[in-house]
Structures are given as structure tokens and as C-alpha cells.
Image: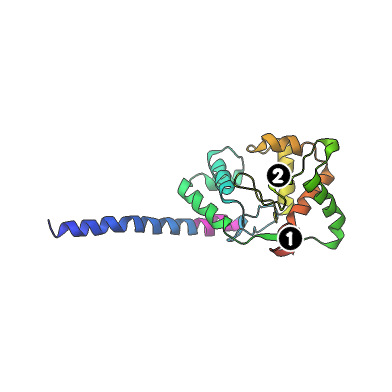
Amino acid sequence: MRRILPITLVLAAMAPTALAEDGKNRVKKLITERCALCHGAQGEASSPIYPRLAHQNRIYLEKQLKNFRDGKRKSDIMNEQAKDLTDEEIAALAEHFSSQPALSHRIPRSKKPLEAVGWYIFHKGNKWSDIPPCKSCHGEKGEGNENLPRLAGQHKRYVIAQLKAFHERKRTNDNAIMHTIAKNLTELEIQAVALYVSGLAPEAKKAEAR
């Protein structure tokens, strides 16, 4: 009995470490085999139609992944990808992508006039069509908070797609407030705001806006 007990204790002590290591390997595999295909290993996104996850707010990322997993937010791709994720895996994925460096786009000179319209809507809103300033919720620099997404540096095309989804009530979560705003945005305002926020993040590495 004296010989067996120490071995049992050693195995018991090792079990949490082994499980933790298995969990880390599982998350690495998820990033490599699932997330990176669309979002990039560091969240830079492989295409402007997919959202950048780099430096996105951690709690917001967790919520969206859980919503995809539980069917509260509809997406043929993401519902399938998230359906078997545990809460622990979701938390680890959110931690990984939220800790990546922020990115933004370089706005071409030819698009500066449109960017200026976006600046006005973002900071001033449009009182004639009941559009509040975007910064009132998403912050002066578009960084959001734990419950709201970081818009700074997001792909223009993705922002446009989400604003239109809110407008048409195709976005099935977080749409109570955004629908009332997006439905009043003109096409020009949508394009302008999306362009402007894509260039936010003055200290980030910039790539040509797409």
C-alpha cells in the first residue's frame, strides 16, 4: 500500500497538467485547421469578405463564437465551424486573437473625400436622418468595448456587409440597436463609414484598403 499510494498521488498531480496541455494542443489545431483558413493565424483575415479578428475585444469574440455555436447568430460557415466548441476552447480562441497586434488599412488619396464623409458620420452622425455618431458607442478611435466590436482596421467590405445585414434584419444577433441606425444609412454613408473605420488604428501596420 505504501508503494501504490505515492504513484497514485503522482498520477493525480500530473493529470491536470496533461489535460491542460491537451487543451492547448486542441486550440492550436483549431486555429491552424479551422480559423486560419478564413481569418488567418494571427487574425489578419485571408480575404476582405472575412472579418479581421486581430485585437478584437476578447469578451465580444467569446459572445459571437457562442452565438454561432448556439445558433443565435446565423452563418452557414460559422455555425458549422463552432458547433462542437467548448466554452473553454472558445475562451482560448478569443484570448489568442484578441492578443494579436491591431491592423488597419492605408486609405488611397483618391478616396480621401469619401473618407471625410465617413469621418463626419462617425464623429457627428446625421441629425437630419436620426443617425447618432458611431463614436457614441464604438469610441473615438473605433476600439469598442467588452460588449461592442472593435471597428478600427476592419475590412471595408466586411463592415459594409454587416451594416446591410443589420439594415435588412439578416443579422440575427445584436440587431436591436443597429437595425434602427443602419436602416437610415444611405449607400454613400455606408461606403464612407466602412472606408473610414478601415483606416483607424494610427499605430498599426497599414495595408492598402480593399
Q: Residues within 10 Å of mark 2 (few under 14, many from 20)?
A: some
Does the magenta portion include 35?
yes
Question: Looking at the rendering, which quadrant does residue 74 occupy?
Answer: top right
Q: Which residues are magenta?
A: 29-37
- Left or right: 192 in relation to 83: right
Label 1: which secondary element = strand
Question: Mainly helix, strand or loop, the magenta region?
Answer: helix
Q: Is 133 part of what is drawn in magenta?
A: no
Q: Nearer the viewer, residue 1 or 132?
A: 132
Q: Please state if 53 lies on the left or on the right of 200 as rendered.
A: left
130 displayed left or right of 19: right
The reply to whether residue 94 is in sight is yes
* Residue designated by label 2: 162
How many marks can you see? 2
Identify the residue shown where x is 34% and y is 55%.
Answer: 16
Front position among marks 1 and 2:
1
Way the structure is coloured: rainbow
Decide if residue 86 is in sight here.
no
The local secondary structure at tag 2 comes to: helix
Residue occupied by mark 1 = 105
Q: Position of residue 36 (x, y in %)?
A: 58, 58
- Separation of marks 1 and 2 at Cα, in angstroms: 18 Å
Residue type pointed to by label 2: Gln
Amino acid of disc 1: His
